[in-house]
Amino acid sequence: MFNYFFTIAIFIALSSYQCYARVAPDFIKICPGQKSECLKSTVQETIPIFSKGIPSLNIEPIDPLKQDKVVVELPGGFKVELLNGTVTGFRNCIVDSVSYNDEEAEMKFHCNLTIKGKYKAKGQILIVSINGDGDAKIKITDVALMLKVKFEDVERDGEVYQEVKSYSLDYKNEGRVTFFLTNLFKGNPEISKAVLSFINENWRQLTEEFGKPVVDELVRLVFEVVKKFFTSIPKKELFVD
Ligand SMILES: *[C@@H]1O[C@H](CO)[C@@H](O)[C@H](O)[C@H]1NC(C)=O
Ligand SMILES: *[C@@H]1O[C@H](CO)[C@@H](O)[C@H](O)[C@H]1NC(C)=O
């Protein structure tokens, strides 16, 4: 009899210990066998929650994603600074597919994103000269993102983590990009307006030539957060064979 209670006591102690020890927030589900359909719906369900940040793991929100200062220098000497920038929309991204095998994940999704902030820009872009300092809002509809992530197992304090080793991103504009920029030509509202129409008429060529450094920077910021997630949660809580 004693033995029986003893076993139960140990069992209760162990199960509460396990509950306590789990690092992953409750919304994280695991997909046995890493089946694509399960991964796709799990990632889809996780995005809006993850976007808000996970205070218990010190993971900051990515929607809105805030950055005091981003500087992008484009080929040809064009330089843009975005100050007090925010990017919104990640929480509503739609997941198109997810696959995972051999420590490599591939994800496709599409998003509508809005970038806002104060901007400073100087230089030649396409055929126009810009010397601007004002408010910026950029609306991006239906950008398709194709993301590849390589993981590696890292052991720390007796626990295995599957950390992000590298990632690469490809993207395609399936919708369009609309710019709302004030004061593109300092002190001259007429020219500013003309330059803005020019930019919006030529948005496709513009984003083809200059989109990559901007997207790369955006993805780098998001990945700082994603990396932290995989560094904080032990592999066994995220993946089962
Ligand atoms: C950015 O935000 C901070 C704090 O809200 C403010 O003090 C600063 O003036 C802002 N910078 C610009 C360029 O608006
Ligand atoms: C983006 O917005 C467009 C137009 O409002 C809409 O048709 C599309 O479904 C949206 N896409 C996403 C990923 O939310």
Image: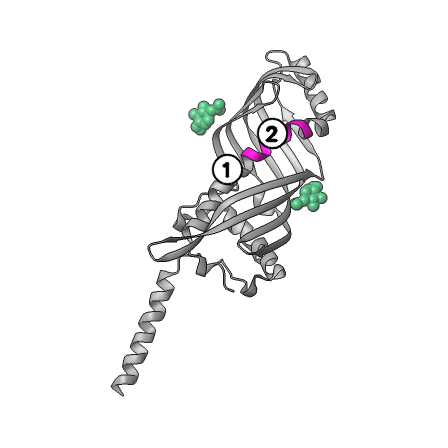
Provide the residue span drawn in magenta.
Answer: 208-217
Residue 126 is situated, as x and y percent measured from the top left of the image, at 69, 19
Q: What kind of residue is marked 2?
A: Lys
Checking the image for residue 221, the label placed there is 1
* Magenta part, dominant SS: helix
The residue wearing badge 2 is 137
Determine whether the residue tagged by mark 1 lies in a helix, strand or loop.
Answer: helix
Q: Quadrant of residue 171?
A: top right
Q: Is residue 114 above or below residue 15?
A: above
Q: Is residue 181 above or below residue 67?
A: above
Residue 170 is situated, as x and y percent measured from the top left of the image, at 63, 40
Disc 1 versus disc 2: nearer the observer: 1
> Residue drawn 47% across and 43% down?
225
Q: Residue furthest left?
A: 2
Whether label 1 lies within 8 Å of ligand 1 gets the answer no
The residue lying toward the viewer, choosing from 40 and 163, is 163
Question: Contact (CB < 8 A) between labels 1 and 2?
Answer: no
> Residue drawn 51% across and 51% down?
49
Marks 1 and 2, the one that precedes in the sequence: 2
Q: Is residue 12 magenta?
A: no
Placement of the N terminus among the 4 image quadrants: bottom left
Q: How many marks?
A: 2
Whether label 2 lies within 8 Å of ligand 1 gets the answer no
Determine whether the residue tagged by mark 2 lies in a helix, strand or loop.
Answer: strand
Residue 4 is situated, as x and y percent measured from the top left of the image, at 30, 84
